[in-house]
Image (cartoon, helix red, strand yellow):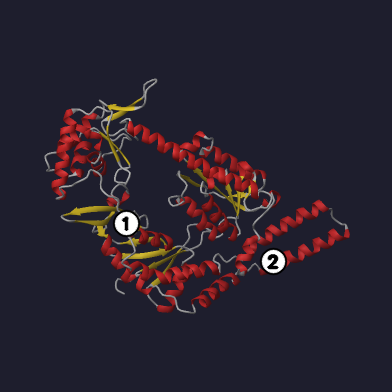
Amino acid sequence: MTVGTRDRNTNCVNNFDDLKGLRAECYVRDSTEDQRDGFGPDIQHHNEERFAQSYGLILGNRWYTEFVSGRSTKKRYEFQQVIEDAILDRFDVLLVDHTSRFGRNQAECIRYKGELQNLGKTVIFVSQSIISGSDKDFLSERINETLDEQYSRNLSRYVSSALIEKIEHGLHVGPAPLGYKSELLPGKRERKIPDPATMPALVLALREYAPGNSSERDVADRLNAQGHRTRNGRLFTGYNIRDVLGNRFYEGKVVYHAGRADEKVIEGDHEVPQEVRVLWQRCQDVKKSRANNSAGHPREENHVYPFSRILKCGLCGSPYHGEAVHHRGHTDLRLTHERRTSGRNCDAWPRSCSVKQLSQEFGERVLTHMHLDRDWKTLVVAALQGESQKSDSRGQQERITRAMENLRKQHLWGDITDDDYRRERTALDLHLKAIAPKVCTDLPNLERSAQILNDLPALWSHPGVTNEEREALVKEVFVRITVDGRALASIEPKPIYAPLFAAMLSQTGVGYRDLEPPPSPPTPPILVFHLKTSM
C-alpha cells in the first residue's frame, strides 16, 4: 500500500458524528418496478438531502441519477462515473438511499464497495442507517444485500413466466406496434387491436415499400410529409420503418426471444387486416431480393461495434452509431455519424467509416506506440510526487498540528471541557484532511493499468478476439476517441491511464499533448492526445 492510499483511507468513517464537514455526493437509481416499491427518484433525493443536512455533510451537485433495471452494472454508466470520480477524489462520502439502489448483485456490490473503501470513500445507505463496511452494520448490510438479490431473481423468474404464458396464449408482449393500440377489458387479458388513428400510416408505409423502388428512409420521408408521426409524436426515421418490416406481428404471429436458441413463434390472438398481411409479405419478398438471400429472416442478427459510445465527431462532438450495410454475400459493419441530433448539420465527410478499416487504423496509429519502458514507474511516481510537493499547504499543516498539540495540553490542564475538546479537535482534523495533498492514483492500480496497456496491442490484433471483446478493451481504457470524418484525430484516456500515456509520450516523443483547461475548479484538466496525420 502506498502513502497516498493510506492517507485517503483515513477518510473512511465508522460513526455518523464523524461526517460533519466531509464532501458528499448522492447516487439515485430507479426502475419501473422500484417506483411501486417506494424507491422513486424524488423519494431518494429527499432522503439523501435530509440525511446530509442532519449530519453536516457538504453536499455536492453531481447527483448521479440513472434509470436502469437488472442486476448487472454493465449499462449503469452513472454508476461507473461514481467510481471514476472516486479515483479523482471528488467526494468523501457517497449517499445511497437503500442497499438495493446500489445494486442487486451481491458479488458486484461487495467488489465495488471494496474499491471505494480502498480509495478512502465511505458509502452510507441512509434509509437503513448503514455505514458500509463498519463492524456494527456488517451483518445487517450482508442480509440486505442477499434479500435485494433474491428479490431481483424472483422478479425475473415471475416476469419470464408471465411473458411465456402470454405468448402461449397468442398475446403480443410489449408496446403496441404501429397501427395498433392496447385494449384491456374487465376480466380479460390485455390484447392489441387495430387503431383507426395510426392504421393509415401503417398501410401507407407498406404500400410505399412493397413495389420495391423505395428505401426505408424514402418511406419515412413520405410519411412525415403527409403529417404522420410516431406514437411519441416524433418524425419517422428509416429505423422505424425497418422495425415495421421486421415485425412478424403483421403476419399474425407473436415471437418470444427472437433469434435466440429458445425462440418461440406462435399464432397470435390479434386481428390483422388482409391488406396488411398481403402488403407485409410483399415487403418481405422485396427485402429478400435486395439481400439476395433466399432464407431471409425478418429479424437481423445483433452486431457489435468496437468503438460503441466512445467514437465522437471531432467537429461537432456527436456520437457515431453502428450500422450494418448488407451487400451480396457479406455484411459490412460501419460507424455512421449521428443523424438524429445536431450532428445532421455537421460538415464532417465522409459520414461513415468501416469498422474493419477503423480498427486497422487504430492498431497502426495508436496501439503500435503503446509500450511502457521498464522505468515507467520511476517516471510516473516522480511526476506525481512532484505535483503533490507543489502544494503550499505545508505551513498550514504545521500550524494546525501545533494548534492540536496546544489544544491537547489545555484539555490535560483542565482549561477546557471534554465536549469543547472533542468539538475543536474534530474541526482541526477535518481542516487538516482538507488541505492534505492527495495523489489520485495509487501504485497497485497503476501496475494493473500498465499491464493492460502493454497487452492491448497483442490482444487487439489476435485473431481469436471478438468485436465484443475489443469493445470492452476500448471502454476500459478510453473516455473518448474522435474522428474528423476520414481519420482518427485524438484519443482521451481515462484518468487512471493518463499518467501512463504521458509517460509513453515522454519516452518515445510520439504525437503531442494538449491540456484542455477545466470548465471550473476543482475539476482537473482533461488529458487529450492528438494524433499526427502520419506516424
Q: For this view, does 363 lie left or right of residue 117?
A: left
**In the rendered image of this protein, does residue 13 appear above or below residue 374?**
above
* Mark 2 burial class by Cα count in 10 Å: few <14, some 14-19, many 20+: some
Of helix, strand and loop, which one carries label 2? helix
Q: Amino acid at mark 2?
A: Gln
Quadrant of res 528? bottom left
Q: Residue at x 60, y 57 (%)?
A: 117
Q: Nearer the viewer, residue 156 or 63?
A: 156
Quick one: quadrant of the N terminus?
bottom right
Tally of numbered tags: 2
Question: In the image, which disc is placed on residue 397?
Answer: 2
Q: In the rendering, at what x and y percent does residue 323 appear?
A: 26, 52
Q: Amino acid at mark 1?
A: Tyr
Q: Earlier in the sequence, mark 2 or mark 1?
A: 1
Q: Residue at x 31, y 65 (%)?
A: 488
Q: In the rendering, at what x and y percent does residue 493 appear?
A: 43, 64
Question: In the image, which disc is placed on residue 246?
Answer: none
Quadrant of res 408? bottom right
Of helix, strand and loop, which one carries label 1? loop
Q: In the rendering, at what x and y percent does residue 272 appear?
A: 22, 29
CA gap between label 2 and label 1 equals 51 Å
Residue that mark 1 sits on: 305
- Residue at the right extreme, as displayed: 413
